[in-house]
Image (cartoon, rainbow, N blue to C red):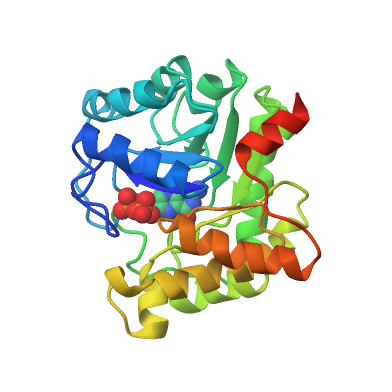
Amino acid sequence: MGVINVTPDSFSDGGRFVEAGHAIEHAFRLIGEGADIVDIGAESTRPGATAVSQDGEIERLLPVLRALRNEAVPVSVDTMKPAVMRVAIDEGAALINDINALRAEGALRAVADSGVGVCLMHMQGNPAAMQDAPRYADVVAEVGQFLAGRVAAAQAAGIARDRISIDPGFGFGKTAEHNMSILRELKEICAIGLPVTFGASRKSTLGAVTGRPVAERVFASVAAALLAIERGAAIVRVHDVAPTRDALAVWLAMRGQAMKSTREIIRELQ
Ligand code: HH2
């Protein structure tokens, strides 16, 4: 899953793709590099980022969604707002990626009323304050319990299990130590029995581990993605698609498997 932030203030690439033309160009670049899904976000979740209004978020998303509408690669929209979810679904999004796990009023309904997939992510607290004092007795168990609860809520609202992915939320209300426990024990989250999405790309924990600024975290991000895949992650959310695919190709080759493109997979399914 390649990340496109149509935001002025994302921690990793803030401001680079806020203009629709740049975001669209970047989306096509990531597809060309082999992204199987593109995830478009129009509101930064970075601690301290300024909130964007519902209309502002829709305005940023629309041109990008429309430009990608006829592409074979499924488009995911990273949003917490039910009204934005509904517009994104109408405009052809295949997946709603919600860091708030559909906890906003009306969010379960917005997804249940459609046939799209959903990614339910764990976050302790809210984006503004989540890094102030994250606390867990057992981070992996608590994240797992939260995700299982949200899956149950989604199913109760009418979202079939085969439409759901879960994400432990690397960096969302977690210290570097919590994040590393989650990566190390990711199999526990996979044991819930749903495809796991994992996103450590360029995050500050990787900066803490390597001592590198955001722009120099590509190798650390690729390492984290590969470790997550090895532990069972089904989707890795990354900013650097080409190097991640190279690492995955080596891992697959070691297992005697070949890398497939989205187009090849779709052709096989037809
Ligand atoms: N991380 C970010 C945003 N959305 N969604 C999922 N499912 N998992 C993640 O780990 C995740 C996510 C934060 O990264 P980024 O989009 O690069 O930054 P920002 O929130 O500042 O736009």
- Residue 253, can we see it? yes
Q: What residue sits 45% from the left and 27% below the top? A: 105
Q: Give whichever of 35, 95 is nearer the camera.
A: 35
User: Which quadrant of the figure has residue 152?
Assistant: top right
User: Which quadrant of the figure has residue 66?
Assistant: top left
Q: Is residue 87 above or below residue 262?
A: above
Q: Is residue 132 above or below residue 177?
A: above
- Residue 231, can we see it? no
Q: How many marks?
A: 0
Q: What residue sits 72% from the left and 61% below the top? A: 232
Q: Is residue 103 left or right of residue 18?
A: right
**Residue 18 locus on image (x, y percent):** 20, 40
Q: Is residue 78 left or right of residue 18?
A: right
Q: What residue sits 36% from the left and 44% below the top? A: 4
Q: Is residue 16 left or right of residue 186?
A: left
- Rendered-image quadrant of the C terminus: top right
User: Which quadrant of the figure has residue 250?
Assistant: bottom right
**Residue 174 locus on image (x, y percent):** 45, 67
Q: What residue sits 44% from the left and 41% below the top? A: 39
